[in-house]
Amino acid sequence: MTEPGDRERRDPEESELSSLGDANRKAAPYTAAVSSLVVAVGVFTWLGHYADEKFGNRTPWLTLLGVLVGMIGGFTSFFRSVLGAQKKK
């Protein structure tokens, strides 16, 4: 016999989230921080690559600059989010 889902439970003690739901709720700030890091690096890398193509650069200096700026900004945002989430505990 299967157990009732979270919404079907009537006992107040059993109405808490399942362990998977609880884990997802705890991991949400870290998932968002990683996503912002990846997006920052990706966007700035793409902008640098676009600028290199636009200016006709044979050496990808602007792409490298975009990677560097994306990494600095992304990691700054990442650590602020992660450290902020840990302080709230």
Image (cartoon, rainbow, N blue to C red):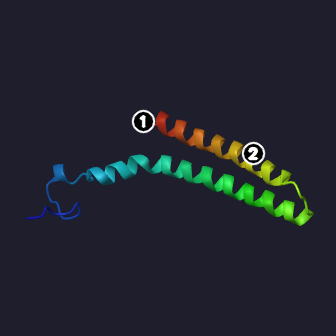
User: Would you place residue 72 above or below residue 6 in this image?
Assistant: above
Query: Tags 1 and 2 in contact by the CB under 8 Å rule?
Result: no
Depth order, front residue of 64/22: 64
Residue drawn at x 63%, y 56% as measured from the top left: 39
Q: Quadrant of the N terminus?
A: bottom left
Residue at 80%, 57% in the rendered image: 48
From the top left corner, tell me how far across and down residue 74 is, in percent.
Answer: 65, 46
Residue nearest the observer in this picture, 63 or 76: 63
| 25 lies left or right of 43 | left
Q: Amino acid at mark 1?
A: Lys
Q: On the picture, is 75 further left or further right than 59?
A: left
The residue sitting at the left extreme is 1
Q: Residue 28, image x and y in percent? A: 45, 51
> Mark 1 vs mark 2: which is more N-terminal?
2
Binning the other alpha carbons within 10 Å of mark 2 as few (below 14), some (14 to 19) or many (20 upward) gives some
Q: CA distance from mark 1 to mark 2?
A: 32 Å
Check disc 2 and give the amino acid type. Leu
Q: Nearer the viewer, residue 54 or 15?
A: 54
Please determine whether, in this image, residue 15 is positioned above or below residue 87.
below
Residue closest to the eye, 34 or 6: 34
Q: Position of residue 41 (x, y in %)?
A: 68, 52
The furthest residue to the top: 87
Q: Residue at x 89, y 58 (%)?
A: 58
- Relative height, residue 83 to residue 43 (above, below): above
Give the label, 1 or 2, closer to the camera: 2
Return the x and y of residue 40 as percentages of the image width and height: 67, 53
> Which residue is the site of mark 1?
89
Report which residue position mark 2 lands on. 68
Specify few, some or many for label 1: CA neighbours under 10 Å numbering under 14, 14-19, or 20 or more. few
